[in-house]
Image (cartoon, rainbow, N blue to C red):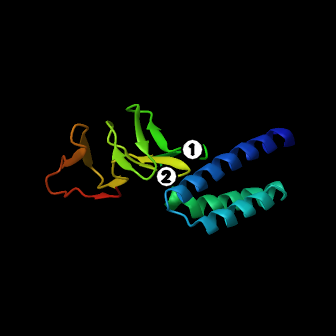
Amino acid sequence: MSMMKSSVFVGIFLLALVSVIHAACVHEKLDPEIFYLIHLLICCFVLKSMLKRAAFVGFVLFVLIPLIHAACWSERLRLGVSHCIDKTDKTWHLVGSNWRNSVCEKCTCKTLSMECCDGFPTHMTKGCVMAYNFRTCTYTLTSIDPSVKCSVIGK
């Protein structure tokens, strides 16, 4: 791979990494000071050699694995807006409000962003199956093996 192509790839990867870190920060999984420290490190990282870049990226990914919350998303709002628009239901919500939409996402309208997370558990017992009821926003776990007790982690 040429140096130009690898630089473009690294740039795209860093943009995605900053987005993941920002999402973790927005969802209060990451302290803002840590976000800015990581952001500063990433800016310095761009100036390093390819070998150092690969080692740094591996380390950052290793550190961020527990912070990834793929079931959530956020949308930045324009300054001064007084409400958020839930694109799923096409409903308006005042800044500071919380709601659950028709696909059971728990949403929050903040001053600078709207954030939503689904209600699915992040991990469950191996061999268990989840049945989700979108009318009541509840789920049940069942196992093929009656001796296995199903449990979930997260949400």
Vertical side of 38 occupied by 124: above or below: above
Residue visible at 22% across and 56% down in the picture: 150
The image position of residue 84, as x and y in percent, is: 47, 41
Between residue 144 and residue 7, name the one nearer to us: 7
Whether label 2 touches label 1, CB < 8 Å? yes
- Residue at the image position 70 percent from the left and 60 percent from the top: 39
Amino acid on which disc 1 is placed:
Leu
- Give the vertical position of 23 relative to 31 (above or below): above
Q: How many marks?
A: 2
**Residue 151 in view of the camera:** yes
> Residue 149, relative to residue 12: is it above or below?
below
Using the numbered discs, state the Cα–Cα distance from disc 2 to disc 1 in whole angstroms.
9 Å
75 vs 7, left or right, is: left
Q: Is residue 137 left or right of residue 65?
A: left
| Nearest the eye: 76 or 64 | 76
The residue wearing badge 2 is 110
Q: State the image coordinates of residue 15 (x, y, percent, origin top left).
A: 69, 47
* Residue under label 1: 77
- Locate the N terminus and report the quarter of the image it occupies: top right
Q: Check disc 1: other Cα within 10 Å, few if <14, some if 14-19, many if 20+.
A: some
Q: Position of residue 51 (x, y in %)?
A: 79, 57
